[in-house]
Amino acid sequence: MAEIVTRAPATPPWFSGVTLLRFAIVLFVLAAWEILADSGLFYRGVVPPLPAIGAALAKLLATGDFYWHMGVTAREIAIGLVLGGVCGLVAGLVIGGNRFIAQAFEPYLYYLSPTPKIVFFPVMIMWFGVGGGSKIAMGAVSCFFPIALSVAAGMRQINPILIRVGTSFRANPWQMATKIYLPAMRHPIVNGLRLGLGVALIGTLLAETKLSNQGLGFLVIQAYNSFNMPLLYAILVVLFVLAIGVNAVVARFARLDDIKRT
């Protein structure tokens, strides 16, 4: 009589060991924060208790002005990311596809990439004014370098056979870029986009904290100047969640593209 073998149901991904470890880390951080808030080691109000931050977060999300300021920042980041991303993509394709140009210009990208982009903000103000243009320019400059360097590195990793196939079919530069280069470099492009998104967010918010009367950066510096620490941390929590969410969406689209191609 054949023995019936029963298999245990597969463990849902949300109960995996990695997920449990992530939850444990979050709980540990929250517990450590609450202990520091009650310890009296810091000046009163600098580390507010979690209930105070939660109340400030709920009040923040219930106000319409917050979403208007968030829309201003999102628009500046999006436009800056598009402008800087397109320029970085073109620069990466040119530098990665031509050894002479790479030897001439790529060192400048490596030298300027780690430079704090906030030092260019006074120049952006003179060029684009004190409005949203200077914040968009800061976001574009910030994301240009990681995207350009990532695309240039990805160009060098393309299988030479693919390039020879395009050349044998006498593909023009536009066809080579759209049919050969970009599909073969989707991972470097996505990685560069994720890095560029992070630095564009940082650059735009820094510019808003320096000189602006709108945007999330303006709300952050306004809460700091009024010493409203619960509100300050509530805004930072929102920024943290939004950054994680956008990054996860980009990574998800990249995984879906890989599944379609397999």
Image (cartoon, rainbow, N blue to C red):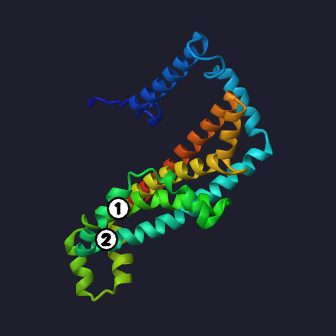
Of pointers 2 and 1, the one earlier in the residue sequence: 2
The spot of residue 181 in percent (x, y) is 33, 72
User: Which amino acid type corresponds to the residue marked 2 in the rendered image?
Assistant: Ile
Label 1's element? Answer: helix
**Image height of 107 relative to 203, above or below:** below
- Nearest the viewer among 72 and 31 is 72
The residue that mark 2 highlights is 95
Q: Quadrant of residue 190?
A: bottom left
Residue 218 visible in the snapshot: yes
User: Which amino acid type corresponds to the residue marked 1 in the rendered image?
Assistant: Leu
- Residue positioned most to the top: 39
Residue 262 visible in the snapshot: no
The residue that mark 1 highlights is 109
Which quarter of the rendered picture does the N terminus lie within? top left
**Mark 2: few/some/many CA within 10 Å (<14, 14-19, 20+):** many
Q: Are marks 2 and 1 in contact (CB under 8 Å)?
A: yes
Which quarter of the rendered picture does the C terminus lie within? bottom left
**Image height of 118 relative to 49, above or below:** below
Q: CA distance from mark 2 to mark 1?
A: 10 Å
Q: Quadrant of residue 105?
A: bottom left
**Image height of 220 relative to 184, above or below:** above
Residue under the point 32% across and 58% down: 110
Q: Is residue 60 left or right of residue 111?
A: right
